[in-house]
Image: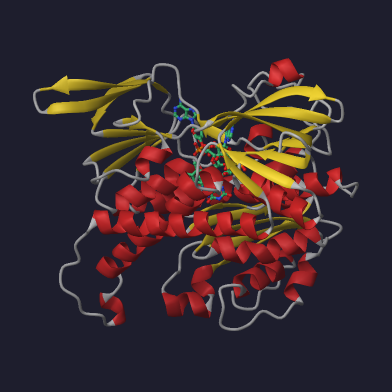
Amino acid sequence: MTDSPCDLLVIGAGPGGYVAAIRAAQLGFSTAVVDEHAAAGGVCLRVGCIPSKALLESSQRLVAARSELAVHGGVAGEIGLDLAAMMKRKDRVVTTLTRGVSSLLRKNKVDHIQGRAKLGAQVGESRSVLVATANGEREIRARNVIVATGSRPASLPGIELDDDRIGASTEALAYSEAPERLVVIGAGYIGLELGAVWNRLGSKVTVLEYLDRILPGADAEIAAAAEKIFRRQGLDIRLGSRVRGASVRNGKDGEHCVVEIEGADPIECDRVLVAVGRVPISDGLGLKETGVATDERGFIEVNERFATSAPGVYAIGDVIGGPQLAHKAEEEGMACVEGIAGGYVHIDYDEIPGIVYTEPEVASVGKTEEELREAGIAYRKGSFPFRAIGRARATGSLEGFVKILAGADTDEVLGVHILGSHAGDLIAEAVAAISFGASAEDLFRTSHAHPTLAEAIKEAALAVHGRPIHM
Ligand code: FAD
Ligand code: NAD
Protein backbone atom coordinates (compact mmCIF):
# COMPACT_ATOMS: atom_id res chain seq x y z
CA MET A 1 0.00 0.00 0.00
CA THR A 2 2.98 2.34 0.24
CA ASP A 3 3.23 2.47 -3.55
CA SER A 4 -0.22 3.55 -4.64
CA PRO A 5 -2.17 5.75 -2.25
CA CYS A 6 -5.62 4.59 -1.20
CA ASP A 7 -8.61 6.88 -1.60
CA LEU A 8 -9.42 6.94 2.12
CA LEU A 9 -7.69 5.95 5.33
CA VAL A 10 -9.76 6.04 8.51
CA ILE A 11 -8.01 6.20 11.88
CA GLY A 12 -10.21 4.49 14.47
CA ALA A 13 -12.64 1.62 13.86
CA GLY A 14 -15.37 2.84 16.24
CA PRO A 15 -18.94 3.48 15.09
CA GLY A 16 -17.83 6.69 13.36
CA GLY A 17 -14.79 5.15 11.67
CA TYR A 18 -16.10 1.78 10.58
CA VAL A 19 -19.35 3.23 9.20
CA ALA A 20 -17.34 5.83 7.27
CA ALA A 21 -15.10 3.07 5.89
CA ILE A 22 -18.03 0.90 4.77
CA ARG A 23 -19.83 3.86 3.17
CA ALA A 24 -16.61 4.81 1.36
CA ALA A 25 -16.23 1.25 0.05
CA GLN A 26 -19.85 1.32 -1.14
CA LEU A 27 -19.01 4.48 -3.09
CA GLY A 28 -16.10 2.69 -4.76
CA PHE A 29 -13.23 4.20 -2.72
CA SER A 30 -10.21 2.01 -2.01
CA THR A 31 -10.38 2.17 1.80
CA ALA A 32 -8.33 1.16 4.82
CA VAL A 33 -9.12 1.50 8.51
CA VAL A 34 -6.48 1.44 11.25
CA ASP A 35 -7.22 0.73 14.89
CA GLU A 36 -4.83 -0.01 17.70
CA HIS A 37 -7.17 -2.76 18.90
CA ALA A 38 -7.64 -6.03 17.03
CA ALA A 39 -11.38 -6.00 17.78
CA ALA A 40 -13.34 -3.64 15.55
CA GLY A 41 -16.15 -1.42 16.83
CA GLY A 42 -14.24 1.01 19.03
CA VAL A 43 -15.20 2.00 22.55
CA CYS A 44 -18.87 1.47 21.74
CA LEU A 45 -18.60 -2.25 21.06
CA ARG A 46 -15.63 -3.13 23.26
CA VAL A 47 -16.15 -1.14 26.46
CA GLY A 48 -19.14 1.14 25.96
CA CYS A 49 -22.66 0.88 24.56
CA ILE A 50 -22.79 -2.87 24.09
CA PRO A 51 -21.25 -4.35 27.26
CA SER A 52 -23.11 -1.80 29.40
CA LYS A 53 -26.43 -2.73 27.78
CA ALA A 54 -25.66 -6.43 28.21
CA LEU A 55 -25.11 -5.92 31.95
CA LEU A 56 -28.15 -3.65 32.26
CA GLU A 57 -30.28 -6.38 30.67
CA SER A 58 -28.88 -9.22 32.79
CA SER A 59 -29.11 -7.29 36.05
CA GLN A 60 -32.67 -6.13 35.30
CA ARG A 61 -33.72 -9.71 34.57
CA LEU A 62 -32.34 -10.69 37.95
CA VAL A 63 -34.35 -7.94 39.64
CA ALA A 64 -37.48 -8.95 37.71
CA ALA A 65 -37.05 -12.61 38.64
CA ARG A 66 -36.61 -11.69 42.30
CA SER A 67 -39.28 -9.05 42.70
CA GLU A 68 -41.77 -9.31 39.84
CA LEU A 69 -42.11 -13.01 39.00
CA ALA A 70 -44.36 -13.82 41.95
CA VAL A 71 -47.02 -11.30 40.96
CA HIS A 72 -47.22 -12.97 37.54
CA GLY A 73 -47.77 -16.31 39.23
CA GLY A 74 -44.22 -17.56 38.79
CA VAL A 75 -42.92 -19.63 41.67
CA ALA A 76 -39.17 -19.87 42.07
CA GLY A 77 -36.81 -20.62 44.90
CA GLU A 78 -34.17 -18.19 46.01
CA ILE A 79 -32.55 -16.55 42.97
CA GLY A 80 -28.80 -16.24 43.35
CA LEU A 81 -26.20 -14.40 41.31
CA ASP A 82 -23.45 -16.00 39.21
CA LEU A 83 -21.57 -12.84 38.33
CA ALA A 84 -18.92 -14.72 36.35
CA ALA A 85 -21.63 -16.18 34.09
CA MET A 86 -23.18 -12.73 33.63
CA MET A 87 -19.78 -11.31 32.65
CA LYS A 88 -19.12 -14.23 30.31
CA ARG A 89 -22.41 -13.57 28.51
CA LYS A 90 -21.50 -9.88 28.20
CA ASP A 91 -18.10 -10.84 26.74
CA ARG A 92 -19.77 -13.22 24.27
CA VAL A 93 -22.15 -10.49 23.12
CA VAL A 94 -19.19 -8.16 22.58
CA THR A 95 -17.13 -10.76 20.71
CA THR A 96 -20.01 -11.68 18.41
CA LEU A 97 -20.55 -8.06 17.48
CA THR A 98 -16.89 -7.07 17.07
CA ARG A 99 -16.38 -10.11 14.82
CA GLY A 100 -19.50 -9.08 12.93
CA VAL A 101 -18.01 -5.65 12.24
CA SER A 102 -14.71 -7.25 11.11
CA SER A 103 -16.61 -9.42 8.69
CA LEU A 104 -18.56 -6.41 7.36
CA LEU A 105 -15.24 -4.67 6.72
CA ARG A 106 -13.94 -7.76 4.91
CA LYS A 107 -17.14 -8.11 2.89
CA ASN A 108 -16.75 -4.51 1.75
CA LYS A 109 -13.06 -5.07 0.95
CA VAL A 110 -11.91 -2.54 3.52
CA ASP A 111 -8.30 -3.18 4.55
CA HIS A 112 -8.42 -3.51 8.37
CA ILE A 113 -5.00 -2.85 9.89
CA GLN A 114 -4.09 -3.19 13.55
CA GLY A 115 -1.71 -0.50 14.76
CA ARG A 116 -1.34 2.96 16.19
CA ALA A 117 -1.56 5.65 13.54
CA LYS A 118 0.01 9.08 13.35
CA LEU A 119 -0.46 11.68 10.64
CA GLY A 120 2.62 12.44 8.53
CA ALA A 121 3.48 14.85 5.76
CA GLN A 122 1.46 15.71 2.69
CA VAL A 123 3.32 14.28 -0.31
CA GLY A 124 1.87 15.59 -3.56
CA GLU A 125 -1.78 14.54 -3.71
CA SER A 126 -1.66 12.22 -0.75
CA ARG A 127 -0.97 12.24 2.96
CA SER A 128 1.47 9.91 4.63
CA VAL A 129 0.19 8.08 7.72
CA LEU A 130 2.64 6.18 9.89
CA VAL A 131 1.28 3.10 11.59
CA ALA A 132 3.12 1.41 14.44
CA THR A 133 2.21 -2.28 14.08
CA ALA A 134 3.39 -5.40 15.87
CA ASN A 135 5.78 -5.91 12.95
CA GLY A 136 7.25 -2.43 13.00
CA GLU A 137 6.31 0.86 11.41
CA ARG A 138 4.35 0.90 8.19
CA GLU A 139 3.71 3.89 5.97
CA ILE A 140 0.36 4.21 4.25
CA ARG A 141 -0.48 6.98 1.84
CA ALA A 142 -4.02 8.18 1.37
CA ARG A 143 -5.74 10.89 -0.69
CA ASN A 144 -8.11 11.53 2.24
CA VAL A 145 -7.80 10.75 5.94
CA ILE A 146 -10.60 10.70 8.49
CA VAL A 147 -9.57 10.94 12.14
CA ALA A 148 -12.14 9.04 14.24
CA THR A 149 -10.10 8.33 17.34
CA GLY A 150 -12.91 8.83 19.85
CA SER A 151 -12.56 9.68 23.51
CA ARG A 152 -11.34 8.40 26.86
CA PRO A 153 -12.64 8.97 30.42
CA ALA A 154 -11.97 12.35 32.01
CA SER A 155 -10.72 12.51 35.56
CA LEU A 156 -10.75 15.21 38.22
CA PRO A 157 -7.93 17.03 39.97
CA GLY A 158 -7.11 15.09 43.14
CA ILE A 159 -8.13 11.77 41.66
CA GLU A 160 -5.68 9.32 40.27
CA LEU A 161 -7.35 6.59 38.27
CA ASP A 162 -5.51 3.40 39.28
CA ASP A 163 -7.52 1.31 36.78
CA ASP A 164 -8.61 -0.87 39.69
CA ARG A 165 -10.29 0.45 42.85
CA ILE A 166 -10.50 3.96 41.47
CA GLY A 167 -11.48 3.42 37.90
CA ALA A 168 -13.76 4.53 35.11
CA SER A 169 -16.42 2.74 33.08
CA THR A 170 -14.09 0.08 31.64
CA GLU A 171 -13.29 -1.21 35.15
CA ALA A 172 -16.93 -0.95 36.25
CA LEU A 173 -17.95 -3.18 33.33
CA ALA A 174 -15.77 -5.96 34.67
CA TYR A 175 -15.64 -5.96 38.50
CA SER A 176 -15.01 -9.53 39.59
CA GLU A 177 -17.45 -9.15 42.49
CA ALA A 178 -20.10 -6.64 43.45
CA PRO A 179 -18.35 -4.06 45.64
CA GLU A 180 -20.05 -3.76 49.02
CA ARG A 181 -19.89 0.05 48.83
CA LEU A 182 -19.52 1.76 45.46
CA VAL A 183 -19.18 5.52 45.08
CA VAL A 184 -20.05 6.85 41.64
CA ILE A 185 -18.85 10.34 40.81
CA GLY A 186 -21.20 12.00 38.31
CA ALA A 187 -24.95 11.49 37.76
CA GLY A 188 -24.76 11.54 33.97
CA TYR A 189 -25.19 8.70 31.47
CA ILE A 190 -22.48 6.39 32.77
CA GLY A 191 -22.98 7.10 36.47
CA LEU A 192 -26.69 6.29 36.28
CA GLU A 193 -26.44 3.27 33.97
CA LEU A 194 -23.55 1.54 35.71
CA GLY A 195 -24.75 2.76 39.12
CA ALA A 196 -28.04 0.98 38.33
CA VAL A 197 -26.23 -2.23 37.33
CA TRP A 198 -24.27 -2.49 40.59
CA ASN A 199 -27.22 -1.37 42.71
CA ARG A 200 -29.20 -4.25 41.20
CA LEU A 201 -26.32 -6.64 41.82
CA GLY A 202 -26.22 -5.82 45.51
CA SER A 203 -23.80 -2.94 46.01
CA LYS A 204 -24.68 0.02 48.18
CA VAL A 205 -24.30 2.74 45.56
CA THR A 206 -23.77 6.40 46.40
CA VAL A 207 -23.89 8.81 43.46
CA LEU A 208 -22.16 12.14 43.99
CA GLU A 209 -23.25 14.88 41.61
CA TYR A 210 -21.79 18.35 41.59
CA LEU A 211 -24.91 20.02 40.15
CA ASP A 212 -28.28 20.37 41.90
CA ARG A 213 -29.88 17.89 39.48
CA ILE A 214 -29.11 14.66 37.65
CA LEU A 215 -28.63 14.31 33.87
CA PRO A 216 -27.56 17.83 32.93
CA GLY A 217 -28.92 18.69 29.50
CA ALA A 218 -32.02 16.52 29.87
CA ASP A 219 -35.45 18.13 30.31
CA ALA A 220 -35.54 19.19 33.98
CA GLU A 221 -39.04 17.85 34.72
CA ILE A 222 -38.15 14.44 33.27
CA ALA A 223 -34.81 14.38 35.12
CA ALA A 224 -36.50 15.23 38.44
CA ALA A 225 -39.08 12.46 37.96
CA ALA A 226 -36.34 9.98 37.02
CA GLU A 227 -34.30 10.99 40.08
CA LYS A 228 -37.22 10.14 42.40
CA ILE A 229 -37.54 6.70 40.84
CA PHE A 230 -33.80 5.99 41.00
CA ARG A 231 -33.75 6.98 44.68
CA ARG A 232 -36.67 4.62 45.32
CA GLN A 233 -34.68 1.88 43.59
CA GLY A 234 -31.92 2.38 46.15
CA LEU A 235 -29.42 4.81 44.63
CA ASP A 236 -28.20 7.23 47.29
CA ILE A 237 -27.99 10.32 45.07
CA ARG A 238 -26.27 13.30 46.70
CA LEU A 239 -26.66 16.47 44.69
CA GLY A 240 -24.49 19.55 45.13
CA SER A 241 -21.53 17.29 45.99
CA ARG A 242 -18.31 18.55 44.48
CA VAL A 243 -15.68 15.83 44.72
CA ARG A 244 -12.21 17.11 45.56
CA GLY A 245 -10.27 13.90 45.56
CA ALA A 246 -10.24 10.14 45.97
CA SER A 247 -7.48 7.86 47.12
CA VAL A 248 -6.83 4.29 48.17
CA ARG A 249 -5.90 3.82 51.85
CA ASN A 250 -4.65 0.88 53.80
CA GLY A 251 -6.71 0.30 56.93
CA LYS A 252 -6.83 -2.50 59.49
CA ASP A 253 -9.36 -4.35 57.30
CA GLY A 254 -7.24 -3.99 54.19
CA GLU A 255 -7.50 -1.56 51.32
CA HIS A 256 -10.39 0.83 50.93
CA CYS A 257 -11.06 4.12 49.14
CA VAL A 258 -11.78 7.54 50.60
CA VAL A 259 -13.66 10.15 48.58
CA GLU A 260 -13.29 13.77 49.65
CA ILE A 261 -16.22 16.11 49.09
CA GLU A 262 -16.16 19.89 49.42
CA GLY A 263 -18.02 20.95 52.58
CA ALA A 264 -19.08 17.41 53.56
CA ASP A 265 -17.64 14.42 55.40
CA PRO A 266 -15.43 12.11 53.35
CA ILE A 267 -16.98 8.80 52.28
CA GLU A 268 -15.29 5.42 52.69
CA CYS A 269 -16.01 2.79 50.08
CA ASP A 270 -14.59 -0.26 48.31
CA ARG A 271 -14.56 1.06 44.78
CA VAL A 272 -14.94 4.40 43.01
CA LEU A 273 -16.38 4.83 39.53
CA VAL A 274 -15.36 8.15 38.02
CA ALA A 275 -17.98 9.18 35.44
CA VAL A 276 -17.50 12.90 34.92
CA GLY A 277 -17.40 12.99 31.12
CA ARG A 278 -14.98 11.97 28.39
CA VAL A 279 -12.09 13.80 26.74
CA PRO A 280 -10.99 13.56 23.09
CA ILE A 281 -8.14 11.29 22.00
CA SER A 282 -6.24 13.84 19.97
CA ASP A 283 -2.78 13.47 21.47
CA GLY A 284 0.02 11.49 19.82
CA LEU A 285 -1.59 11.87 16.39
CA GLY A 286 0.82 14.47 15.03
CA LEU A 287 -2.00 17.00 14.72
CA LYS A 288 0.08 20.06 15.55
CA GLU A 289 2.85 19.15 13.11
CA THR A 290 0.25 18.51 10.42
CA GLY A 291 -1.60 21.79 11.01
CA VAL A 292 -4.81 20.26 12.37
CA ALA A 293 -6.31 22.80 14.78
CA THR A 294 -7.87 21.73 18.09
CA ASP A 295 -9.75 23.79 20.65
CA GLU A 296 -8.49 24.40 24.19
CA ARG A 297 -9.97 21.09 25.38
CA GLY A 298 -8.31 19.09 22.59
CA PHE A 299 -11.38 18.58 20.36
CA ILE A 300 -10.46 18.70 16.66
CA GLU A 301 -12.01 21.69 14.92
CA VAL A 302 -13.91 20.97 11.71
CA ASN A 303 -16.07 22.88 9.25
CA GLU A 304 -19.58 21.88 8.13
CA ARG A 305 -18.07 19.20 5.84
CA PHE A 306 -15.97 17.79 8.71
CA ALA A 307 -12.77 19.11 7.09
CA THR A 308 -10.00 20.08 9.50
CA SER A 309 -7.55 22.90 8.90
CA ALA A 310 -5.13 20.49 7.14
CA PRO A 311 -5.79 19.61 3.50
CA GLY A 312 -7.35 16.18 2.96
CA VAL A 313 -7.77 15.54 6.71
CA TYR A 314 -11.28 15.20 8.15
CA ALA A 315 -12.51 14.34 11.64
CA ILE A 316 -15.74 12.88 13.05
CA GLY A 317 -17.24 11.36 16.20
CA ASP A 318 -16.30 11.91 19.83
CA VAL A 319 -12.99 13.52 18.90
CA ILE A 320 -14.76 16.59 17.43
CA GLY A 321 -17.09 17.16 20.42
CA GLY A 322 -20.86 17.60 20.49
CA PRO A 323 -23.00 14.75 21.82
CA GLN A 324 -20.64 11.84 22.47
CA LEU A 325 -23.00 9.22 21.11
CA ALA A 326 -22.40 6.28 18.78
CA HIS A 327 -25.25 7.15 16.42
CA LYS A 328 -24.02 10.76 16.17
CA ALA A 329 -20.57 9.43 15.20
CA GLU A 330 -22.19 7.12 12.60
CA GLU A 331 -24.20 9.98 11.04
CA GLU A 332 -21.05 12.06 10.82
CA GLY A 333 -19.04 9.19 9.32
CA MET A 334 -21.59 8.68 6.59
CA ALA A 335 -22.08 12.41 5.88
CA CYS A 336 -18.34 13.10 5.84
CA VAL A 337 -17.64 10.39 3.25
CA GLU A 338 -20.56 11.44 1.07
CA GLY A 339 -19.15 14.98 1.25
CA ILE A 340 -15.69 13.77 0.19
CA ALA A 341 -17.42 12.08 -2.76
CA GLY A 342 -18.85 15.48 -3.69
CA GLY A 343 -22.27 15.07 -2.09
CA TYR A 344 -24.46 17.15 0.17
CA VAL A 345 -23.49 17.21 3.88
CA HIS A 346 -26.10 17.97 6.49
CA ILE A 347 -26.71 16.85 10.05
CA ASP A 348 -29.34 18.46 12.26
CA TYR A 349 -28.04 17.92 15.77
CA ASP A 350 -31.50 18.71 17.17
CA GLU A 351 -32.65 15.44 15.63
CA ILE A 352 -30.09 13.28 17.46
CA PRO A 353 -31.87 11.41 20.25
CA GLY A 354 -30.29 10.71 23.63
CA ILE A 355 -31.21 7.70 25.74
CA VAL A 356 -30.26 6.61 29.24
CA TYR A 357 -30.83 2.85 29.44
CA THR A 358 -31.90 2.67 33.07
CA GLU A 359 -35.25 1.13 34.02
CA PRO A 360 -37.34 3.11 33.30
CA GLU A 361 -35.38 4.55 30.38
CA VAL A 362 -34.98 8.28 29.75
CA ALA A 363 -35.17 9.26 26.08
CA SER A 364 -35.34 12.63 24.42
CA VAL A 365 -35.05 14.44 21.14
CA GLY A 366 -35.28 18.11 20.22
CA LYS A 367 -35.59 21.03 22.61
CA THR A 368 -36.16 20.83 26.34
CA GLU A 369 -38.67 23.11 28.03
CA GLU A 370 -35.79 25.11 29.52
CA GLU A 371 -34.21 25.63 26.08
CA LEU A 372 -37.50 26.84 24.59
CA ARG A 373 -38.05 29.24 27.49
CA GLU A 374 -34.52 30.56 27.22
CA ALA A 375 -34.88 31.08 23.45
CA GLY A 376 -38.21 32.87 23.99
CA ILE A 377 -40.09 30.37 21.80
CA ALA A 378 -43.80 30.10 22.67
CA TYR A 379 -44.82 26.45 23.07
CA ARG A 380 -47.67 24.23 24.18
CA LYS A 381 -47.05 21.14 26.24
CA GLY A 382 -48.87 17.82 26.39
CA SER A 383 -48.00 15.06 28.87
CA PHE A 384 -49.44 11.61 29.31
CA PRO A 385 -48.59 9.02 31.99
CA PHE A 386 -47.94 5.38 31.15
CA ARG A 387 -50.11 4.27 34.06
CA ALA A 388 -53.19 5.22 31.98
CA ILE A 389 -52.08 3.04 29.05
CA GLY A 390 -53.56 -0.47 28.73
CA ARG A 391 -50.35 -2.15 27.61
CA ALA A 392 -48.42 -0.60 30.50
CA ARG A 393 -50.99 -2.08 32.91
CA ALA A 394 -50.64 -5.47 31.22
CA THR A 395 -46.84 -5.46 31.44
CA GLY A 396 -46.67 -3.73 34.82
CA SER A 397 -44.44 -0.92 33.46
CA LEU A 398 -46.42 1.92 34.98
CA GLU A 399 -43.72 4.45 35.77
CA GLY A 400 -43.09 7.59 33.78
CA PHE A 401 -44.74 9.71 31.13
CA VAL A 402 -44.42 11.17 27.64
CA LYS A 403 -44.04 14.92 27.25
CA ILE A 404 -44.41 16.67 23.92
CA LEU A 405 -43.51 20.30 23.29
CA ALA A 406 -44.99 21.94 20.19
CA GLY A 407 -44.82 25.45 18.77
CA ALA A 408 -47.69 27.55 20.15
CA ASP A 409 -48.61 28.97 16.74
CA THR A 410 -47.25 26.31 14.36
CA ASP A 411 -48.04 23.14 16.35
CA GLU A 412 -44.67 21.84 15.05
CA VAL A 413 -43.16 19.22 17.35
CA LEU A 414 -40.09 20.85 18.90
CA GLY A 415 -39.17 18.37 21.62
CA VAL A 416 -40.24 14.97 22.92
CA HIS A 417 -39.12 13.62 26.27
CA ILE A 418 -40.02 10.17 27.55
CA LEU A 419 -39.45 8.53 30.91
CA GLY A 420 -40.62 4.94 30.78
CA SER A 421 -39.95 1.33 29.85
CA HIS A 422 -38.76 1.04 26.23
CA ALA A 423 -38.53 4.85 25.97
CA GLY A 424 -35.39 4.34 23.87
CA ASP A 425 -37.39 2.49 21.22
CA LEU A 426 -40.45 4.72 21.48
CA ILE A 427 -38.39 7.85 20.80
CA ALA A 428 -37.76 6.73 17.19
CA GLU A 429 -41.26 7.90 16.22
CA ALA A 430 -40.56 11.31 17.74
CA VAL A 431 -37.22 11.55 15.90
CA ALA A 432 -39.01 10.86 12.61
CA ALA A 433 -41.72 13.40 13.50
CA ILE A 434 -39.16 16.13 14.22
CA SER A 435 -37.09 15.24 11.12
CA PHE A 436 -40.16 15.51 8.88
CA GLY A 437 -41.36 18.73 10.54
CA ALA A 438 -44.53 17.02 11.81
CA SER A 439 -47.09 18.76 14.01
CA ALA A 440 -48.62 17.42 17.22
CA GLU A 441 -51.80 16.97 15.20
CA ASP A 442 -49.89 14.85 12.62
CA LEU A 443 -48.80 12.65 15.52
CA PHE A 444 -52.27 12.16 17.00
CA ARG A 445 -53.88 11.60 13.59
CA THR A 446 -51.39 8.77 12.97
CA SER A 447 -52.84 5.38 13.86
CA HIS A 448 -51.09 3.85 16.86
CA ALA A 449 -51.64 0.13 17.35
CA HIS A 450 -53.51 -0.96 20.45
CA PRO A 451 -52.45 -2.04 22.97
CA THR A 452 -48.94 -0.55 22.76
CA LEU A 453 -46.84 1.79 24.86
CA ALA A 454 -46.66 4.06 21.79
CA GLU A 455 -50.27 5.05 22.46
CA ALA A 456 -48.84 7.31 25.18
CA ILE A 457 -47.23 9.38 22.40
CA LYS A 458 -50.56 9.76 20.62
CA GLU A 459 -52.25 10.74 23.89
CA ALA A 460 -49.51 13.26 24.74
CA ALA A 461 -49.96 14.78 21.26
CA LEU A 462 -53.71 14.98 21.91
CA ALA A 463 -52.90 16.57 25.27
CA VAL A 464 -50.97 19.32 23.45
CA HIS A 465 -54.44 20.22 22.06
CA GLY A 466 -56.09 19.77 25.45
CA ARG A 467 -58.08 16.71 24.34
CA PRO A 468 -56.54 13.42 25.52
CA ILE A 469 -59.05 10.56 25.35
CA HIS A 470 -57.91 8.35 28.21
CA MET A 471 -57.33 10.99 30.92
P1 FAD B 1 -14.63 5.31 19.48
O1 FAD B 1 -15.74 4.36 19.58
O2 FAD B 1 -14.03 5.81 20.75
O3 FAD B 1 -13.51 4.59 18.61
C1 FAD B 1 -12.26 5.16 18.36
C2 FAD B 1 -11.26 4.06 18.08
O4 FAD B 1 -10.04 4.64 17.66
C3 FAD B 1 -10.92 3.23 19.30
O5 FAD B 1 -11.00 1.86 18.99
C4 FAD B 1 -9.50 3.65 19.64
O6 FAD B 1 -8.78 2.61 20.28
C5 FAD B 1 -8.96 3.97 18.26
N1 FAD B 1 -7.80 4.86 18.24
C6 FAD B 1 -7.60 5.99 18.98
N2 FAD B 1 -6.42 6.55 18.65
C7 FAD B 1 -5.88 5.77 17.69
C8 FAD B 1 -4.66 5.82 16.94
N3 FAD B 1 -3.77 6.83 17.09
N4 FAD B 1 -4.40 4.83 16.05
C9 FAD B 1 -5.28 3.81 15.86
N5 FAD B 1 -6.43 3.72 16.54
C10 FAD B 1 -6.73 4.69 17.43
N6 FAD B 1 -23.21 5.93 23.02
C11 FAD B 1 -24.46 5.66 22.58
O7 FAD B 1 -24.89 6.22 21.57
N7 FAD B 1 -25.27 4.75 23.23
C12 FAD B 1 -24.85 4.12 24.35
O8 FAD B 1 -25.60 3.30 24.90
C13 FAD B 1 -23.56 4.39 24.83
N8 FAD B 1 -23.10 3.77 25.95
C14 FAD B 1 -21.84 4.01 26.38
C15 FAD B 1 -21.40 3.37 27.54
C16 FAD B 1 -20.12 3.58 28.01
C17 FAD B 1 -19.64 2.87 29.23
C18 FAD B 1 -19.25 4.47 27.29
C19 FAD B 1 -17.84 4.69 27.76
C20 FAD B 1 -19.67 5.13 26.16
C21 FAD B 1 -20.98 4.92 25.69
N9 FAD B 1 -21.48 5.57 24.58
C22 FAD B 1 -22.75 5.32 24.13
C23 FAD B 1 -20.66 6.53 23.82
C24 FAD B 1 -20.06 5.87 22.56
O9 FAD B 1 -19.33 4.74 22.93
C25 FAD B 1 -19.18 6.84 21.82
O10 FAD B 1 -19.89 8.04 21.57
C26 FAD B 1 -18.73 6.25 20.50
O11 FAD B 1 -18.01 5.05 20.70
C27 FAD B 1 -17.86 7.24 19.73
O12 FAD B 1 -17.50 6.66 18.51
P2 FAD B 1 -16.18 7.10 17.75
O13 FAD B 1 -16.20 6.34 16.46
O14 FAD B 1 -16.08 8.57 17.70
O15 FAD B 1 -14.96 6.62 18.65
P1 NAD C 1 -21.83 12.95 31.50
O1 NAD C 1 -21.39 14.23 30.90
O2 NAD C 1 -23.05 12.29 30.99
O3 NAD C 1 -22.04 13.14 33.07
C1 NAD C 1 -21.01 13.62 33.90
C2 NAD C 1 -21.61 14.10 35.20
O4 NAD C 1 -20.56 14.33 36.13
C3 NAD C 1 -22.37 15.40 35.07
O5 NAD C 1 -23.65 15.26 35.65
C4 NAD C 1 -21.49 16.42 35.79
O6 NAD C 1 -22.23 17.48 36.37
C5 NAD C 1 -20.86 15.53 36.85
N1 NAD C 1 -19.61 16.05 37.43
C6 NAD C 1 -18.61 16.71 36.80
N2 NAD C 1 -17.63 17.05 37.67
C7 NAD C 1 -18.01 16.61 38.89
C8 NAD C 1 -17.45 16.65 40.21
N3 NAD C 1 -16.27 17.24 40.45
N4 NAD C 1 -18.10 16.06 41.24
C9 NAD C 1 -19.30 15.46 41.02
N5 NAD C 1 -19.90 15.41 39.80
C10 NAD C 1 -19.26 15.96 38.75
O7 NAD C 1 -20.55 11.99 31.39
P2 NAD C 1 -20.40 10.41 31.59
O8 NAD C 1 -21.52 9.86 32.37
O9 NAD C 1 -19.00 10.21 32.06
O10 NAD C 1 -20.49 9.87 30.12
C11 NAD C 1 -19.61 10.35 29.11
C12 NAD C 1 -20.30 10.40 27.78
O11 NAD C 1 -20.46 9.07 27.27
C13 NAD C 1 -21.71 10.95 27.90
O12 NAD C 1 -21.72 12.35 27.77
C14 NAD C 1 -22.41 10.30 26.76
O13 NAD C 1 -22.27 11.11 25.63
C15 NAD C 1 -21.66 8.99 26.54
N6 NAD C 1 -22.50 7.86 27.06
C16 NAD C 1 -23.71 7.66 26.48
C17 NAD C 1 -24.51 6.64 26.95
C18 NAD C 1 -25.84 6.42 26.29
O14 NAD C 1 -26.05 6.94 25.21
N7 NAD C 1 -26.75 5.67 26.91
C19 NAD C 1 -24.10 5.83 28.00
C20 NAD C 1 -22.87 6.08 28.57
C21 NAD C 1 -22.07 7.10 28.08
Q: Give the image quarter of residue 469.
A: bottom right
Query: Which quadrant, please, contains the N terminus?
Result: top right
Query: Which quadrant, please, contains the C terminus?
Result: bottom right
Q: Where is residue 24 in the image (x, y as percent from the top left)?
A: 76, 50
296 in relation to 216, above or below: above
Q: Nearer the viewer, residue 184 or 295?
A: 295
351 in relation to 135, above or below: below
Q: Where is residue 447 in the image (x, y as percent from the top left)?
A: 71, 81
Asked whether, in this view, residue 82 is left or right of residue 127, the answer is: left
Q: Position of residue 42 (x, y in %)?
A: 55, 44
Q: Nearer the viewer, residue 157 or 380?
A: 157
Q: Give the image quarter of residue 296.
A: top right
Asked whether, in this view, residue 19 is left or right of residue 436, the answer is: left
Q: Nearer the viewer, residue 265 or 255?
A: 255
Outermost residue on the front side: it is 3
Q: What colour scheme was applied to this rendering of the protein?
A: secondary structure
